[in-house]
Image (spheres, rainbow, N blue to C red):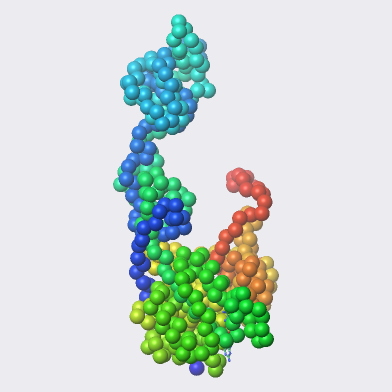
Amino acid sequence: MRKPIKVEEAIQSVMKWPLTGEKEFVSIENSYNRVLAEDLLATTDVPWFKRSPYDGYAIVAASTQQANSEYPIFLEVLGTIGAGFTWDAELQPHQAVKIMTGAAIPEGATAVIMVELTKEVIKDGKTYVQIKRKVKDGENIVEIGEDMQKDEVLVKKGTSINPGVMATLATFGYKTVAVMKKPTVAIIATGSELLEVDDPLEKGKIRNSNAYMLKAQILRAGGEPIYYRLVKDDFEETFLAVKQAIEQADIVITTGGVSVGDFDYIPKVYEKLGATLLFNKIAMRPGSVTSGALLNEKVIFGLSGNPSACYVGFELFVRPYLKAMLGQENIYLKKAQAILEKDFLKANPFTRFVRAKTTFDGNELHVEPVGKDKSNIVSSLIDANCFIVLPGGSRGFEKGLKVDILLIEDEGAPIWDEHITDSRLPR
Ligand SMILES: Nc1nc2c(c(=O)[nH]1)N[C@H]1C(S)=C(S)[C@@H](COP(=O)(O)OP(=O)(O)OC[C@H]3O[C@@H](n4cnc5c(N)ncnc54)[C@H](O)[C@@H]3O)O[C@H]1N2
Ligand code: MOO
Ligand SMILES: [Mg+2]
């Protein structure tokens, strides 16, 4: 008899053994979605020179002291600079340089006035800019270091490279980036009933869908599915596949063959390998047979063969382990609360993770189970973007209750609908 342990105990027993990830260098072009292996520091001030935020005139603010709409002042315009160009002479009072957004502020200039507030006049062959208001010192000047300051830690290692991090890397000239190596994850699908994806159906057989599902889950979590094999329900074959995989990959996942059937060989494989069993029964549904074992400080995850159970097992146990290897902080699925939109009246002797779809009405989250809830179901995974967590020992949950959900994926909205609202007004 197997003794079920709590979900959190299973998570803890796995998370005691995170491998230390390694780093590697990739080109900035290939760094999107990778995880930073080193803190990202500002190597210069940004901007590193004063620049204009507007198209206008660089001036000495003091020259405008007396300006007002009745008595405008006139400054001589010495020339024009666009972004990327500099003005080499020092600007004197009563002089101006026409300047474009992004151009370096000339030496001596202390403010910029927007072009809309001025008028150019030509007198005796000279160009003057007419100014009708007092301009303050420092007005419309982007100061050195306004954006980022030299030596400032901008992004912590363990952060996933998003478009903003990408822009920051480029700002400081990182042609190559130190990122965490993607943990390699071997997938071994077990089962004599399994066909390859391009095999025609035969009596009693099904196509191996778990391996492809796991590949996608591994990629989504930031790992590298490197190796994948399909083995028959044969002890030797399964044993050799796992033994080889553990030498080649950082993490090994098997699917199927983990329960109490005559041909479920995974428990015996652990034994022969001399692996330490971490758990072989968890008080959860689906995936109660999910097993974990430790060999050479590497965790082998024995996920259920049933597709939905396999999926849940990955997200709850493999995902955080993989993300910990990547040095990430937020390794667990994000928890939220949502209003249950349909009765879920099944009793829950064990904690249940119901595949569900959550939607946001602009105000609150709502959630509805995606349908067929048995663990042998594939189709309910199509629309699932979260799990509803129903604690063990509960009788079922009625529509309208607030329930905990774990978010897996987030999609956009189908229409632009009241995307801009004033939160101060009643709705
Ligand atoms: N007497 C008992 N029988 C079962 C129990 C139990 O407690 N006592 N638990 C049931 C539960 S719950 C689950 S979940 C499954 C777990 O079984 P295994 O992990 O050993 O997986 P298999 O028996 O190999 O396969 C189960 C099911 O999944 C299909 N499968 C397997 N691999 C794949 C794949 N790669 N792609 C698609 N489908 C796959 C397989 O054909 C079976 O239908 O055990 C119950 N039995
Ligand atoms: O382990 Mo099974 O998926 O609980 O149904
Ligand atoms: Mg079985």
User: Which residue is at a point 61% across and 55% down the rendered structure image?
Assistant: 412
Q: Whole-percent x and y of residue 318?
A: 47, 73
Q: In this view, does 33 lie above or below 19?
A: above
Front one among 310 and 227: 227
Residue at the far top in the pictured view: 124
Q: In which quarter of the image is residue 323?
A: bottom left
Instruction: Specify whether residue 186 is in view.
Output: yes
Q: Quadrant of residue 269?
A: bottom left
Q: Whole-percent x and y of residue 237?
A: 48, 87
User: Which residue is at a point 55% across and 77% down the rendered structure image?
Assistant: 310
Q: Is residue 325 above or below residue 90?
A: below
Q: Whole-percent x and y of residue 427?
A: 66, 49
Front one among 247 and 50: 247
Residue at the far left in the pictured view: 151
- Relative to 205, 61 lies left or right: left
Front one among 361 and 302: 302
**Number of residue marks:** 0
Q: Whole-percent x and y of residue 9?
A: 44, 79
Q: Is residue 255 above or below residue 77?
A: below
Front one among 295 and 141: 295
Instruction: Specify whether residue 68 is in view.
Output: no
Residue at the far front in the pictured view: 199
User: Which residue is at a point 38% across and 78% down the rendered structure image?
Assistant: 247
Q: In this view, does 414 lie above or below 193?
A: above
User: Which residue is at a point 66% across and 84% down the rendered structure image?
Assistant: 202
